[in-house]
Image: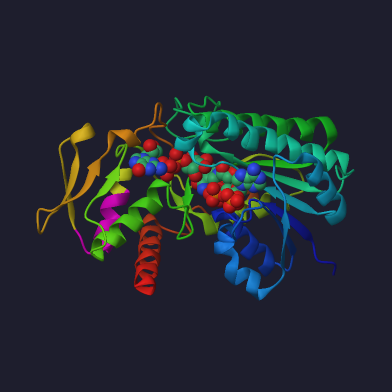
Amino acid sequence: MKHKTALIIGITGQDGYYLAHLLKQKNYAVHGLCRRVSTDNNTIRLHTLLNDGGITLHPGDLLEPIALVRLLHTLQPDEIYNLGAQSHVGISFENPSLTAQIDALGTLHVLEAIRTADLLKKTRFYQAGSSEMFGNPQTTTQNEETPFSPVSPYGAAKVYAHHITTTYRQAYGLFACNGILFNHESPWRGENFVTRKITIGAARIASGQQDVLLLGNLDALRDWGHARDYVHAMWAMLQQAEPDDYVIATGRTATVRDFATLAFRYAGMDLEWEGGGANEIGRERKTGTVRVKVDPALLRPTDVHTLCGNSQKAQQKLGWNPHQTSLDDLVHEMLEADMKRIREAA
Ligand code: NAP
Ligand code: GDD
């Protein structure tokens, strides 16, 4: 049987790693778009997978549309996963134009490249949409019918990407799916997202390499799943008879404070919380030492307070299971991985 060919845009990121791993297991010929940088630091997550073979990297950029056309023309991929993005919400307030170019226009560039390379009838397309598109929703849980009302430049750019993907599905018959994914984390999460910042901070504090962890909004409630489970849903969307949009979420929420409490517990420190707002601190119960402080500089101009997804449609149509990894297991795995990295670097 002929193996399918997939192109992953954003293969060097967290989800790119897990998706490449999954597609390799499924015997795909896996290709990845990789930005040119002066060192090979951006392929660090992929080292083991690259050494095992079966993945081909191609230099390229979402901001270079003609080169995308050339690449698609050569590869003739069966599936394209567009995971490429400036994906940090906080940074999008500092770099709104770059975020819009990569996350919004970059998506248009891929869709136009599919059209220009005459692949509308052959290639299936996945767009990495986000729960950040909902902003601060009026409903306690969010599904595919919940209106978008973004409150960040990142969220606004992703809304454009969502609608332009739907437009190409309707206008040209492209098999194009929007995943609306809620937060998903892993030991390969970027270090400036709050979960990984917390597990690295707790691991360093436990190892005596750091005294205190500075965080922003401790009250934010997020629906946190494991990236390894979420990439299965991306793949499953492109295997259906018809293209559609799907919310992928666990349906459970925890605050940033809850996440920190769990991570510090796994690192051997029981935290108790005192004060509120910018004066809140997390103190080690046993010693009284302050381990977490709020830094007002880390608060965003506008923040999403609560997100909780309803993934019933994905459960029914894709057979996707939202309960594969508990929050405890996720935090434990992330903390253990950071402790191991610290031990190996010593
Ligand atoms: P990530 O770790 O930040 O990875 C982003 C990827 O995009 C990296 O490979 C990055 O390459 C690449 N990229 C950035 N700018 C690019 C450009 N101009 N041209 C080509 N590639 C570019 O993000 P992630 O957590 O894996 O998320 C994957 C996708 O899902 C993103 O689109 C994100 O917005 C979306 N999403 C994520 C979550 C989540 O909770 N993780 C939830 C919903 C949606 P470099 O390595 O060179 O920087
Ligand atoms: N990054 C960060 N750093 N966030 C902090 C910090 C901190 O020190 N302290 C508190 N937070 C709060 C943020 O204000 C936000 O409310 C919450 O923690 C989560 O922040 P992030 O981990 O940066 O994730 P995000 O929810 O803003 O965005 C992620 O999830 C989206 C899906 O909803 C990213 O992965 C996006 O790409 C993704 O689309």
Give the image's coloring scheme: rainbow
* x and y, in percent, of residue 206 in the image: 24, 63
Q: Is residue 5 left or right of residue 17?
A: right
Q: Majority secondary structure of the magenta segment?
A: helix
Task: Write down the quadrant of residue 306 in the picture.
Answer: top left
The answer to which image quadrant residue 110 occupies is top right
* The C terminus sits in image quarter: bottom left
Please tell me which residue lies in front, 104 or 39: 39
User: Does 156 appear above or below 237?
Assistant: above
Q: Residue at x 68, y 67 (%)?
A: 24
The answer to whether residue 310 shows anywhere in this view is no
Which quarter shows the N terminus? Answer: bottom right
* Residue 160 image position (x, y, % from top left): 64, 29
Residue 260: in magenta span: yes
Spot the residue most to the right: 118
Q: In the figure, 293 relative to 133: above or below?
A: below
- Residue with the most extreme left position: 287
Residue at the spot 74% in from the left edge and 45% down from the top edge: 125
Residue drawn at 81 percent across, 41 percent down: 66
* Quarter of the view holding residue 6: bottom right
Span highlighted in magenta in the image: 259-269
Q: Position of residue 95 (x, y in %)?
A: 52, 32
